[in-house]
Image: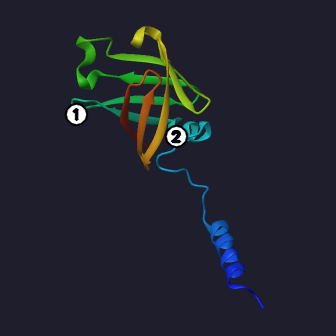
């Protein structure tokens, strides 16, 4: 005779094994592999506090191009720049030729939806972005 407690334990184990936990949690930082797969060859549009979007193109091979021309940033800084990008640990890193005085920054990325990201830079600055396939 099988005891009810044993049946319940076996059922609980079967349910736990059947649940697909391989998908990343929506609030979990992306892994290095997820970052590379998501960013490489894509245009990422950083949302700005004043309503516009700032496009960055992450070329395969580690080159990133940025343009602030549509936002009128030419009055404040060089309107376009090129830099390099790479994945270090589970963070996206980039370094521009002139923007930010060539300082290197790394970002933790969290997927917010199929084409949405939240990002936090290593100095604490944070925001959101959309990815254009």
Question: Measured from the top left, where is residue 79 in percent x and y?
Answer: 31, 16
Toward the bottom, the furthest residue is 1
Toward the right, the furthest residue is 1
Question: Measured from the top left, where is residue 33 in percent x and y?
Answer: 61, 39
> How far is disc 1 from disc 2 in space, using C-alphas?
25 Å
The quadrant of the image that shows the N terminus is bottom right
Along the viewing direction, whichever of 31 and 68 lies nearer the viewer: 31
Question: Measured from the top left, where is residue 66 in percent x and y?
Answer: 39, 23
**In this picture, residue 45 sits left or right of residue 16:** left
**In this picture, residue 69 sits left or right of residue 130:** left
Q: Residue at x 60, y 36 (%)?
A: 32
Q: Nearer the viewer, mark 1 or mark 2?
A: 2
The disc label shown at residue 51, or none: 1
Pointer 2 residue: 29
* Vertical placement of residue 104 versus 109, above or below: above
Q: Residue at x 53, y 35 (%)?
A: 40
* Vertical placement of residue 52 versus 23, above or below: above
Q: Secondary structure at mark 2?
A: loop
Question: Measured from the top left, where is residue 29 in percent x and y?
Answer: 52, 40
* Vertical placement of residue 83 versus 11, above or below: above
Q: Residue at x 41, y 25 (%)?
A: 124
- Lower sequence index among marks 1 and 2: 2
* Vertical placement of residue 31 versus 62, above or below: below
């Amino acid at each position: 005779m099988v005891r009810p407690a044993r049946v319940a334990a076996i059922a609980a184990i079967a349910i736990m094994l059947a649940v697909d936990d391989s998908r990343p949690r929506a609030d979990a930082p992306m892994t290095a592999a997820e970052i590379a797969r998501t960013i490489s060859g894509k245009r990422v549009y950083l949302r700005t506090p004043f309503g516009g979007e700032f496009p960055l193109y992450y070329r395969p091979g580690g080159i990133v191009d940025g343009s602030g021309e549509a936002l009128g940033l030419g009055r404040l800084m060089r309107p376009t720049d090129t830099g390099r990008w790479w994945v270090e640990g589970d963070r996206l890193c980039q370094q521009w030729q002139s923007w930010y005085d060539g300082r290197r920054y790394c970002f933790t990325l969290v997927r917010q939806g199929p084409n949405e990201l939240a990002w936090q830079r290593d100095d604490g600055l944070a925001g959101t972005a959309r990815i254009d396939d």
